Amino acid sequence: MSSKIIALLSLAISALVFSGCSSASMGSKEANILGLVKYQKADYSPSSSTTFAIHTNELGPRRNFSGDKLTLLWGLVTIKDY
Protein backbone atom coordinates (compact mmCIF):
# COMPACT_ATOMS: atom_id res chain seq x y z
CA MET A 1 0.00 0.00 0.00
CA SER A 2 2.74 2.47 0.91
CA SER A 3 4.71 1.63 -2.23
CA LYS A 4 1.70 2.62 -4.36
CA ILE A 5 1.44 5.94 -2.55
CA ILE A 6 5.16 6.58 -2.98
CA ALA A 7 4.95 5.70 -6.69
CA LEU A 8 1.97 8.03 -7.26
CA LEU A 9 3.64 10.81 -5.30
CA SER A 10 6.88 10.51 -7.26
CA LEU A 11 4.95 10.54 -10.56
CA ALA A 12 3.08 13.68 -9.53
CA ILE A 13 6.26 15.47 -8.43
CA SER A 14 8.11 14.53 -11.61
CA ALA A 15 5.17 15.74 -13.73
CA LEU A 16 5.26 19.10 -11.94
CA VAL A 17 9.01 19.45 -12.33
CA PHE A 18 9.12 18.53 -16.00
CA SER A 19 6.10 20.62 -16.98
CA GLY A 20 7.64 23.65 -15.25
CA CYS A 21 10.93 23.19 -17.05
CA SER A 22 9.28 22.86 -20.45
CA SER A 23 7.29 26.07 -20.08
CA ALA A 24 10.38 28.00 -19.00
CA SER A 25 12.39 26.79 -21.99
CA MET A 26 9.67 27.94 -24.40
CA GLY A 27 10.39 31.54 -23.49
CA SER A 28 7.43 32.37 -21.32
CA LYS A 29 6.77 36.10 -21.00
CA GLU A 30 5.19 35.90 -17.56
CA ALA A 31 5.85 34.21 -14.23
CA ASN A 32 3.51 34.32 -11.25
CA ILE A 33 4.19 32.89 -7.78
CA LEU A 34 0.87 32.91 -5.88
CA GLY A 35 0.45 36.60 -6.59
CA LEU A 36 3.29 37.48 -4.24
CA VAL A 37 5.73 37.97 -7.11
CA LYS A 38 4.66 38.48 -10.70
CA TYR A 39 7.21 39.08 -13.47
CA GLN A 40 6.18 40.20 -16.94
CA LYS A 41 8.76 40.42 -19.69
CA ALA A 42 8.50 43.26 -22.24
CA ASP A 43 5.18 44.44 -20.85
CA TYR A 44 4.66 48.15 -21.43
CA SER A 45 1.12 48.29 -20.01
CA PRO A 46 0.35 51.12 -17.60
CA SER A 47 0.10 50.33 -13.91
CA SER A 48 -3.05 50.96 -11.93
CA SER A 49 -3.57 53.91 -9.65
CA THR A 50 -3.68 51.67 -6.56
CA THR A 51 -0.02 50.64 -6.72
CA PHE A 52 3.24 52.22 -5.61
CA ALA A 53 5.01 52.48 -8.96
CA ILE A 54 8.81 52.58 -8.99
CA HIS A 55 10.60 53.30 -12.26
CA THR A 56 14.17 52.07 -12.64
CA ASN A 57 15.25 55.36 -14.24
CA GLU A 58 14.40 57.06 -10.94
CA LEU A 59 16.94 54.85 -9.17
CA GLY A 60 19.81 55.65 -11.50
CA PRO A 61 20.56 56.86 -15.04
CA ARG A 62 19.87 54.27 -17.73
CA ARG A 63 19.59 54.12 -21.50
CA ASN A 64 18.71 50.49 -22.25
CA PHE A 65 15.20 49.85 -20.96
CA SER A 66 13.82 46.32 -21.27
CA GLY A 67 10.14 47.00 -20.60
CA ASP A 68 9.99 44.38 -17.84
CA LYS A 69 7.58 44.79 -14.95
CA LEU A 70 7.85 43.20 -11.50
CA THR A 71 4.76 43.28 -9.30
CA LEU A 72 5.01 42.44 -5.61
CA LEU A 73 2.39 41.62 -2.98
CA TRP A 74 -0.66 41.31 -5.26
CA GLY A 75 -0.02 44.61 -7.00
CA LEU A 76 0.87 46.74 -4.00
CA VAL A 77 4.35 47.58 -5.34
CA THR A 78 5.27 47.66 -9.05
CA ILE A 79 8.83 48.04 -10.34
CA LYS A 80 8.87 49.06 -14.00
CA ASP A 81 11.86 49.13 -16.34
CA TYR A 82 10.47 51.64 -18.83
Image (cartoon, rainbow, N blue to C red):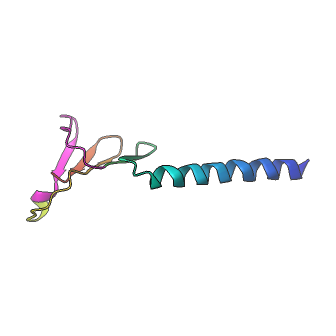
Q: Position of residue 82 (x, y in %)?
A: 15, 51
- Magenta highlight on residue 33: no
**In the image, farthest residue toward the right:** 1
Write the residue at 41% across / 42% down. 35
**In front: 78, or 43?**
43
Left or right side of 71 for 65: left
Q: Nearer the viewer, residue 14 or 35?
A: 14
Name the outermost residue toward the top.
49
Q: Is residue 47 left or right of residue 27?
A: left
In the image: residue 26, left or right of residue 62:
right
Q: Residue at x 81, y 52 (%)?
A: 6
Name of the residue lying farthest toward the front: 26
Image coords of residue 48 (percent x, y): 21, 34
Q: Residue at x 75, y 49 (%)?
A: 9
Numbered disc total: 0
| Residue stretch rendered in magenta on the structure | 41-57
Residue at x 44%, y 51% (from the top left corner): 26
Q: Tell me residue 1's x, y (percent).
A: 91, 47
Main secondary structure of the magenta stretch: loop
Indicate yes or no whether the magenta region holds residue 43: yes
Residue 42 at x, y percent in the picture: 25, 48
Give the left or right position of residue 32, taking residue 48 as reference.
right
